[in-house]
Image (cartoon, helix red, strand yellow):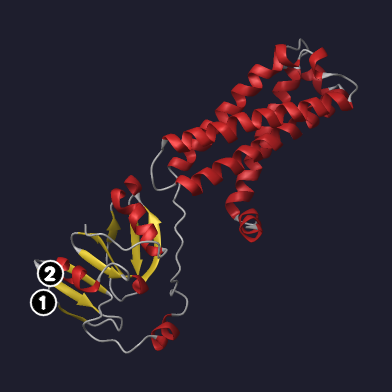
Amino acid sequence: MLHSIFSHIRSRFFLRNLLLLLVTAILAGHFIVTHDRDESLGELLNMPAYYRSVAYSGGIALLLLLSIYGVSMRMYRKHSGRGLTASWIREQALYGVLGVVILELFAATLLFYAMGFWIMDTAYFKKLFGPIVMFILLVNLCYLLFYQNQRPVVKIRYQFLDNRVDVREKMTPVVVDQPALLYVENGNTWCIDFSGRRSIWTQSLNESQKRFGGEDYFRGARSWLIHRDAIVSVAQISGKRLSVTCDLEGEFKLEVSRRSVVAFKLWLDGEEDANLS
């Protein structure tokens, strides 16, 4: 788990996201400090207390943003591939909204305490609490919408792209009845084996899938059937479909329909056999 977290922190996506969160936190800190104030921006910039207040408020805002980010990414990894479900919305509201509101109350209480005030004796709940809760709701909604259009987390256990020759040398001798890919073209069923040879296949895809089973072969559409060892990578395309790249000579456009995405990911991870399409 820690390795996964540190790998994500080192990723280019996290660094870009962190920069966006820093800017957002500074702006949030500014609006919190200047909320219901009569001074102009020029007057505030000449006040040393303004910078300290923005630093305190911005620091808390950054903490809240990072918390919402972590919750949203966790919810995405847990629920991705199934669409926006009631369970996803419920858990996002529980941890991303309610949990972060409680964290904000705790952080604000500590900050007021450090300054010598009890939070109930201040105007926090009268002037700031409502806008802060709206801010938390808005950030949760933005992350929810973002992850609804983000690439799914697809674990590829068989990655041969960088070492094709060595992998093929370790394979058992290739025979024609152990195809890497079967596909239909111009009314004929064709076979591509792991050495790249192309030949006519005498059985239909339905017959072939029944013959080989679903442990090593997946039927992604009506026109193709692929062996797991031929898969190099998977990427999401429009409509939340998946595009499958093969470790084979030639160009093949293999797509997994939206309704088959969950079954495909489970099959690729070895958690269930592929069903007939």
> Which residue is disc 1 drawn over?
202
* Residue visible at 64% across and 17% down in the picture: 130
Q: From this viewpoint, which residue is outermost toward the right?
A: 116
Question: Whole-Å distance between the Cαs marked 2 and 1?
Answer: 7 Å
Image position of 50 (left or right of 180): right
* Residue linked to disc 2: 204
User: Hey, which quadrant is residue 169 in on the image?
Assistant: bottom left
| Along the line of sight, the residue nearer the viewer: 91 or 245 | 91
What amino acid is found at the position of numbered circle 2 in the picture? Ser
Q: Residue at x 24, y 83 (%)?
A: 197
Residue 28: where, in percent of width, then height?
A: 68, 27
Quarter of the figure with the N terminus? bottom right
Query: Dot 1: few (<14), some (14–19), or many (≥20) neighbours within 10 Å?
Result: few
Answer whether residue 27 is visible to the viewer in this image. Answer: no
Q: Is residue 49 visible from the viewing direction of this image?
A: yes
Which of 77 and 243 lies nearest the eye of the viewer?
77
Q: Quadrant of residue 25?
A: top right
User: What amino acid type should be assigned to the residue bearing mark 1?
Assistant: Thr
Q: Position of residue 96 (x, y in %)?
A: 58, 34
Residue 107 tag number: none
Give the vertical position of 33 relative to 207 (above or below).
above
Residue 48: image x %, image y %? 88, 25
Q: Where in the figure is residue 173, as x and y percent of width and height?
A: 32, 89
Q: Residue furthest left?
A: 187
Looking at the rendering, which quadrant does residue 228 occupy? bottom left
Towards the viewer: 225 or 272: 272
- Identify the secondary structure beneath mark 1: loop
| Element on which disc 2 rests | loop
- Give the crowd class for mark 2: few <14, some 14-19, many >=20 residues within 10 Å: some
